[in-house]
Amino acid sequence: MTPILETQRLKLREFNQNDLDDLAAMVADENQMRFYPRSKTRDEASAWISRNLALYKEYGFGFWLIESLPTSGFLGYCGIRPLALEGASEIEIGWHTKKTFWNQGIATEAATAARELAFRRFGLSRLVAIIHPDHIASRRVAENIGMHDEKTVILDDYPAVIYTAGRS
């Protein structure tokens, strides 16, 4: 388990296949996934981990597991990844925390750390976040980490507000 960084309460680390049970349980929950097109299967969760393992090798980054420092418990994921958005190459920042940890500042703390890594360690100049318009909590996280809404689009029948942030 390769640690990426630690914050006051959290550790971001690379996923591995041993994390499948935690991830699969989170993304299979319909309430947890209400702002996504649908919940995901265990096989889809496994493929998602595999994609991130490939991203770590190719780019040095991807979406990382959020772990509680005091308990080492699984809290969700957060990170950055390459993305094609309306024909343009972008780097997406994303976060998703377990519903049992909502409204505790976990996503904001993890996303702040991921944003700083993106700009400082990886030298990226721009990040985008793709957020369902009704997902007020996630929009608040984007704003709390210094992002602003750039436009609203429809991506494969999914309404999304595109938030952006640039390196200052």
Image (cartoon, rainbow, N blue to C red):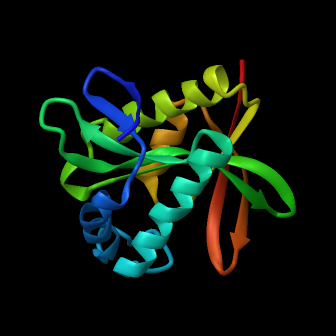
Q: Residue furthest right?
A: 87
Residue name at image x 46 percent, y 59 percent: 135
Give above or below for 22 relative to 59.
below
The x and y percentages for residue 78 are 45, 45
Residue name at image x 40 percent, y 37 percent: 2
Res 132 visible = no
- In the picture, measured across the screen, residue 15 lies left or right of residue 67, that is right
Q: Residue furthest left?
A: 71
Give above or below for 47 relative to 66.
below
- In the picture, measured across the screen, residue 88 lies left or right of residue 40, that is right
Q: Quadrant of residue 99?
A: bottom left
The x and y percentages for residue 148 are 65, 38
The N terminus lies in quadrant: top left
Q: Quadrant of residue 31?
A: bottom left
Residue name at image x 72 percent, y 18 percent: 168
The x and y percentages for residue 91 are 70, 46
Give above or below for 113 relative to 92.
above
The x and y percentages for residue 167 are 72, 23
Give above or below for 145 relative to 59.
above
Residue name at image x 35 percent, y 70 percent: 27
Q: Nearer the viewer, residue 51 or 151?
A: 51
